[in-house]
Image: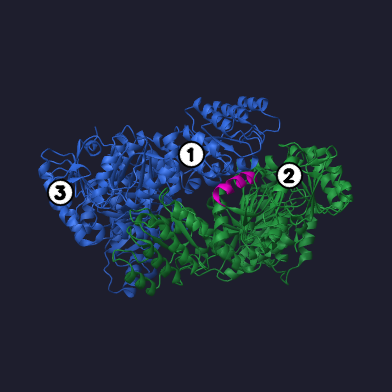
Chain colours: A blue, B green
Amino acid sequence: MSELSAFFQPQSVAVIGASKKPGKIGHAIIENMLACGYRGKIYPVNPREEEIEGLPCRRSVQEIGTAVDLAVVAVPARHTVGVAAECGVAGVKNLVVITAGFKETGREGLVLEKELTRVCRRHGMRLLGPNCVGMMDTHIPINASFSAVFPSRGDIAFISQSGAMLLAILDWSLANGVGFSRVISLGNKADLNEADFIADAAADPHTRVILCYIEDVADGRQFLQAAREAGRQKPVIILKSGVSQAGARAASSHTGALAGSDLAYETAFRQCGVIRARTMAELFDLAVAFSRQPVPAGDRVAVVTNAGGPGIIATDHIERMHLHMSRFGKETSEALRSGLPPESAVYNPVDVLGDAGADRYRFALGKVLDDPSVNGALVLVCPTAVTEVEETARAIVDTHRAHPDKPVFVAYMGGRTLAPGAKLVADAGIPAYTFPEPAITALSGMVRYSRARQNPAPQNPPAFTDINRDRAAKTLKAVKDEGRLVLLGSEAARVADAYGIAAAPVVLAATAREAAEKAREVGFPVVMKVASPQIMHKTDVGGVKVGLRNAQEVEQAFVQIQESVQRYLPDAVIYGIEIQKMMPAGTELIIGMSRDVQFGPLIAFGLGGIYVNLLKDVSFRLAEGLTAEEARNMITETKAYTLLRGYRGEEPADINALVEMILRVARLALDFPQIAEMDINPVFAYPQGASALDVKITVS
Amino acid sequence: MSELSAFFQPQSVAVIGASKKPGKIGHAIIENMLACGYRGKIYPVNPREEEIEGLPCRRSVQEIGTAVDLAVVAVPARHTVGVAAECGVAGVKNLVVITAGFKETGREGLVLEKELTRVCRRHGMRLLGPNCVGMMDTHIPINASFSAVFPSRGDIAFISQSGAMLLAILDWSLANGVGFSRVISLGNKADLNEADFIADAAADPHTRVILCYIEDVADGRQFLQAAREAGRQKPVIILKSGVSQAGARAASSHTGALAGSDLAYETAFRQCGVIRARTMAELFDLAVAFSRQPVPAGDRVAVVTNAGGPGIIATDHIERMHLHMSRFGKETSEALRSGLPPESAVYNPVDVLGDAGADRYRFALGKVLDDPSVNGALVLVCPTAVTEVEETARAIVDTHRAHPDKPVFVAYMGGRTLAPGAKLVADAGIPAYTFPEPAITALSGMVRYSRARQNPAPQNPPAFTDINRDRAAKTLKAVKDEGRLVLLGSEAARVADAYGIAAAPVVLAATAREAAEKAREVGFPVVMKVASPQIMHKTDVGGVKVGLRNAQEVEQAFVQIQESVQRYLPDAVIYGIEIQKMMPAGTELIIGMSRDVQFGPLIAFGLGGIYVNLLKDVSFRLAEGLTAEEARNMITETKAYTLLRGYRGEEPADINALVEMILRVARLALDFPQIAEMDINPVFAYPQGASALDVKITVS
């Protein structure tokens, strides 16, 4: 039993703020509870009424006399805290607060919402809302909401951060034959949030697909864990809005939330196996597909059509969605050739021709579904004079029943004539579309899920045994004690070195003589750079010298840098001059880290040098749960990988060294939350090893 | 009157191969001609019948006695040539050949089709088909097809290369309230093709939107001209399949066509102002939007919604489709603030809140459409307890009528409850959708069209006065006379130089002494490369020496190269050694040309050097019609442009010199059809001028 079972399966429900007046929310809830077929006790609570809809009305929750599992609250906002306290005293287990007027209205509302949440916590009650439509479960059944629509029974759980969206979708679902197992309006998420309901839906035997509309997540880490665990059992499909900058602004003014970057969401979703829908249509196409069809074992699709043109359109879209056309085995092609008219196309797409009746579809679909190279099939039916609309539909249904492990979709390309066929297959659980593209898009989402489910369990980057955490901590503390936010190059290099990140040694020298000595230690030739937190563009003030080959050159350079910088910036605080060994050139890469407000450190890998900003050839992962395998994927999915593999006959770079460097950066970021940003640019990749040339670290 | 007017407005139609038997194509055509309300004469022709559907039947077309404007032919393929000859003799003006069994069946069919076409040409008859469904016009009206469905009257012309697709769409259109002005099934395009019908639809007063499904074009140049001219008057929207490699294979096995590359189609469509639809749904969403709404003047969109979440989703998709959210003027925001409840959002998206009635929609939509910064509006309606479904629909319709120059779309986010509203606005010509995204996608297509219509007229690259065409011709001829396909570096440089393409001079020397002399002429330092059509990788055989600073070094290098190459490849034919002046390094670019089978020379511009293949930062244009402005757009739309503008404080490159080089390459490609491919990689761009470092030319 999940923690929230009392939420969905209460033995008794109190409706506080129940009303006799039709049109009032407090009346709609009572009506809904009665109409849905709820089998427990319903207690209307309203001090000014005797009875509502035939149920005796109580003056307060205490008056009920027996412990109540769930209270649905629809009293004015200013009374909610008092009501919650009474509920707590009366032993109510959970609250749904429908009432609006909390943090969505501004500062005062936020204070009220925090007070409400505190009261619930104090009494050990969980809280859904405030400012929500409520929740429903079609299997219990329960309808603790003011929605005018109760959905058909189904196996899709829908969790929505927007109440309006939820009402719109319920209205839409009735017209489109889509059913739900449960529907939850999250409201302001003062306590219970999307992660709680995702986890609970994962445990719900009546739910096969988890669908969410969200604008943000309440707690990145909780969300990641819930989505990951749920995803192993059933698909979690999310439409997250606020993708664009303008959209994010609109979202933040709407929910007042600190949303985190969309890039971090994108990365988090992929890493925890969430299937992200891009549009509302895609969200529901995916939901229906997952609800009715098996998950395909791979990405190879067969197309059976009675017309060439639509077959080509389907083929285009299959490639566009990164699926592949199956290449049939010899047996299949031969069987098709011998069983179909000679003008038929027997490769993929299979064209059974315009004069095909049901039998030809049955034969061809059966043969392609028999083929082990086919993971799923799309059937296209165009209206011709001889199309056997219903017979063909039955042939498709029968053939699919004989191959229940492979998903089948149908596009009925027409309207009036084909409607009976579309209805027949849809009733038998085969999603029917008008055009081929949405079917293919849905199938591609299923393939993404199939792949994600095979991902190994996430695991944080290892605490490599050679890491010297204290040394890094000491350097960071020293910077903080000085009140600085940006580490000097030598400090950043020391932190990197403490974490085994192979940085080119950088040392700080205060005098020309010290510089010469230290240069000898790191080894010639060296680069020298002025060390000053106030100088951003060191080259512009004569603060950089390269290629210094001996002690004498180093001493001279020291003096020259000092003089030049003093001439340009007489007031700059100079910590000394940094000396770094010049490294041989390798493939220039970047490894970076920025910290997302929701999901923590976000690690970047890509092509470095001047091309970073220009070409944006960068891949991202969260440090949280980053395995060596995923770090390797980060590398292989960039264009830089083409260079690293040995472009134009060059020697391949040491990918293992890069994987390790990524993991060490991730470990460092996880160990020190005060590191806000880190950039290693360039990293030089060599045939053996890799070297961090320039490490920048910012703390907060 | 367009050339094809007799096609669509015949005074008389003969149906050759007319049949008494229901179910036969020859019967369906007679039925369709009678049922559609055609006002001219209909002559069934069949030697074995006396009358068909009450019309007297003739034994042959001659027997009709009077000249016939159009003959629709549905006799077996082997009889079509004879029938066409009879029609020619009898003075028939045009033919529609429905009959299949021509080039789509193979070699013999192709021969028959050519013969049929020849007969038509000889008699000055134009031919639609063969292997087509026929054609219809709902305004004439005429239905010279065997389609079971005759569409509603409308203002969309639909031209389809797939008969099945056409039948599917007609079936679909009836269920979706979409009407057509005319519908043409192109079949095998033996004579009349998509360009002919696009040109004619452009002249048709009943057609407002031209819609095409094609798998290829019959004649690239004719298509470009027709699409360009039509596009200036009305939108031309095309779904072209065969985009993917697999799709192109399927298309070529379906139509047997030499299709040309999809990249060339993409480029051609953009350059001639065609709006390309990516999916079938988009094709029809665009058609409906253009048919019912005005073209927006710009890309700024206002959103009016009664719920926050859907507003964010719309905002996201607006940015995703490269549109922009309008920023309202101060007056608008103030008017909205004073006229709406205080909790409303008065910036864009405008949230009129869940309790909004029709009046609030009317007020808010009116204010935003008044704002000059708004080019079009999207209204979102979510179902709430108080939504005034029909009143709100009327408010939207009225407000739009008062602002007829700005497009308005509505998303009715629901099903059952909102259906009456959706119907009401749709009936008034405002496209209604269930979800916001398709409305935005359609609007973005309209914006693309609005921009394309403003493009200046295409104009071929100028014949620069300094071009020495003869010199280029002579060099190309010499190569051809030697039976070679690849020009030597010195030859390619000479051709480029003749066209004023600033190539670093390359000269060929046969002896060490000559090399030294020529090096002095081009100026030191120089690069030397062995010149041999048989040596692809010159460096590998010691065939390249760089940085030679004087005559002595050049002479030495000559001998070394000669010896080294002879040692590695004793049998290679060596033309001598090429000497090129070493140019100072600049930003490395590529300018390339490849010749498309349909659209001629395709010019490429992008980042050069080793990054070309890796990063694919390349833009394309057809040489045909390439203006200086478009050449400049080619440059600005690449990422390389960021470098060229002066990246990180460097001096900007000479963009004008690059524009000119692109135009000269295009001119060269247009002047010499025998040049199959040309690559200049790298081009060095400098603050003043640009230099073609390495020119490769292949001829056919």
Residue A343 falls in which quadrant of the image? top right
Chain where mark 1 sits: A
Q: Residue at x 12, y 41 (%)?
A: A64
Q: Which mark is residue A84?
A: 3
Amino acid type of the residue that numbered disc 1 sits on in the rendered structure:
Leu
Q: Magenta includes B176?
A: yes
B570 over B198 or under it: above or below? above
Q: Magenta includes B168?
A: yes
Q: Which residue is mark 1?
A: A443
Give the alpha-carbon distance from disc 1 to disc 2, as whole Å: 40 Å
In percent of width and height, residue A276 lies at 41, 45
- Say whether residue A689 is left or right of residue B515: left
Chain where mark 2 sits: B
Closest to the observer: A25 or A237?
A25
In percent of width and height, residue B449 lies at 57, 62
Q: Secondary structure at mark 3?
A: helix
Q: Earlier in the sequence, mark 3 or mark 1?
A: 3
Could you tell me what secondary structure mostly forms the magenta stretch?
A: helix
Closest to the observer: A177 or B262?
A177
Q: Looking at the image, is mark 3 or mark 1 nearer the viewer?
A: 3
B627 over A9 or under it: above or below? below
Residue A198 falls in which quadrant of the image? top left
Give the alpha-carbon distance from disc 3 to disc 1, as whole Å: 46 Å
Q: Are marks 3 and 1 on the same chain?
A: yes
Amino acid type of the residue that numbered disc 2 sits on in the rendered structure:
Ile
Q: Which mark is residue B29?
A: 2
| Residue B585 can be seen in this image | no
In percent of width and height, residue B19 lies at 77, 39
